[in-house]
Image: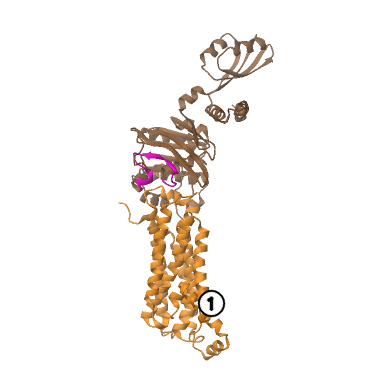
Chain colours: A orange, B brown
Amino acid sequence: MRKPLPLFTRAFVDSWRSTLGWAAGLAATIFIYLPLYPSIGASPDMQRLMDSFPPELIKALNYDQITSGPGYTQATMFGLIGFMLMTIASVSWGAAAVGGDEESGQLELTLAHGVTRTQVVLERALAILLRVLLLVALVFVLVRLLTDSAQLNIRPENLFGTSMLFAGLTLLSGSTALFAGAVTGRRTYGLAAGAGVSVLGYVFNAVGRQSKDVDWLLNLSPYSWAYGNNPVANGADWAAAGWLWGISAVLVALSAVALSRRDIGT
Amino acid sequence: MPPDQVNTPGQVITVDSLTKKFGRREVLHGVSFGIEKGSVFGVIGPNGAGKTTVMRCLLDIIRPTAGISTVLGENPRTAGPALRRRIGYLPGELFLEGRITGRKLLSHYADISGPVRPGRVDALAERLGLDLDRHTRKLSKGNKQKLGLVQAFMHDPELLVLDEPTSGLDPLVQQEFLTMVREAQANGQTVFLSSHVLSEVQQAADTVAILRDGRIVTVATVDSLREGAVRHMRFTATGITAADAAALLAAVPGIGHLEVLPAGDGVELSATLGGAIQPLLQVLATLELTELVLEDPDLEESVLKLYGSIRGTGSTNGVNGGNGRRRRKGHGV
């Protein structure tokens, strides 16, 4: 009779175009960047180029190990383009899930039906989680597929661990956007908060790596928690993954509490 | 909060001293009213009077600052989804998502509301002349409103809460809507609707609450409003002077706005009648009438009188009456 998880189903199914679009973007990025590794990253010219750059720049861009396969994949895919694409996707989904829906006036009608506010937040968060996991799974599969032909030399367990960190990092910015949207009922605040967490995390990482005096900034950077020890080369820091996923889960719970406690559409 | 609800038997909605503040601005100042089971209850008032706020409180979309309300025997604040499944709600401003057909959207709402009989959605859509296979973003305002009505009516809820239900609908569809409301009533459902268009409430509702600036000005049956309402009349008669005609008419109880003009060998006279018709007819029977128009009573005018009566203990009263009259003439007869 009654379908299980109706809000989840709707959030997930209705966004298939968007999910597919992001999947295509990620796939394109992987197919463009990774096969170039043997001719760019691994070439002696690259090493010379890196040597000519100021070390501060190298550190800021996380290019320290770009001449190795795992370092190259870390720096280009997980640390830069992939990180950017997934963050944008996750933040836009998070901001739209409650704040955007309320701002457009549609949440009111949904809540007038037989659902609770907690259910709305949890089911929509679940839809975001599933989309993020699907995209990260796609990244995992494609990188794995190219590992041999692009001579990346990445160990599967490290790739898996990195993927989990990548998902956690993305979910953290998405759940921040969800939370800010649920508290304020405005999509823009959700976008700003989600993007803020990501950008600040990235900047704190870039600055914190410059010297011992400012390395405390790394503690404030989710980006650094995830990628600080070069997980593609060295394996995941599972505690960091736990923090990223755990904080995301707490933010989702807080979103449900915040939404349940206030007036809608005012 | 006291656990007890003001549960008057036979009432589907009971609202007691409902108060709502947004920040420091109080928009509802202790609103109280009750709606009998199986009735059609209309709330009218100008924009910003608080109609939408009252309805949103009943659906637990916003929470009152003070006061208690009971909906279908339960407190909407704590009753949860089970209560809302028994209600059909049409928001005052309806926004519907883009890339989905009306049919899919309705099927989603059916998943999160009470059970919908098979074929019910198509039947309603056909009655309202709504194409369910178009994307909602391509629908006109009127068609979106029809979709909103279908989602409110489709699960045959015990209670319908409709905020400005006919906004954007063309007159034929408005008539169909009125029929749907009457059928719902015949079916034992209760309807609570709002409007700033008085004629809509006049046609649909048994009882009307007039809300102004967050207060109920009055709750009255449509019939009693009609009795207190003003009729416009005008006639031409021959063989009488203007002065005599004026004197005759002025003696009729409830006559106002008397204007008499000489016309040929008789008079042309217009006036308003605020009381019973019989005394007027007795006077008219003594005249040589060549033309007589006695209009339907105008609820709008009687409501404007009520607005005027609370606005003004001051001197604005007469001005309001004048406005009402001019407005009426503007409508044409």
Q: Nearer the viewer, residue B155 or A119?
A: A119
Q: Residue furthest front?
A: A213
Q: Nearer the viewer, residue B12 or B182?
A: B12
In the rendered image, the quadrant that contains the N terminus of chain B is: top left
Q: Residues within 10 Å of mark 1 (few under 14, many from 20)?
A: some
- Whether residue A255 appears in magenta in the rendering, the answer is no
Q: Nearer the viewer, residue A182 or B274?
A: A182
Q: Chain of mark 1?
A: A
In the rendered image, the quadrant that contains the C terminus of chain B is: top right
The x, y position of residue B297, in whole percent, is 53, 24
Give the number of callouts: 1
The x, y position of residue B113, in whole percent, is 36, 48
Q: What residue appears at the point 47 percent right and 72 percent down from the top-left corner?
A: A220
The x, y position of residue B242, in whole percent, is 67, 12
Q: Residue furthest left?
A: A1
For residue B279, say whether it is visible.
yes
For residue B125, say whether it is visible.
no
Magenta-colored span: B60-80
* A140 up-or-down from B327: above or below: below
* B226 up-or-down from A100: above or below: above
- Whether residue B61 appears in magenta in the rendering, the answer is yes
Q: What residue appears at the point 51 percent right and 66 percent down from the top-left corner?
A: A195
* B282 up-or-down from B170: above or below: above
* B308 up-or-down from B5: above or below: above
The x, y position of residue A219, in whole percent, is 46, 74
Q: Which residue is mark 1?
A: A207
Residue B85 placement, left or right of A73? left
For mark 1, give the secondary structure.
Answer: helix
Query: Residue flagged by tag 1: what amino acid is it?
Result: Val
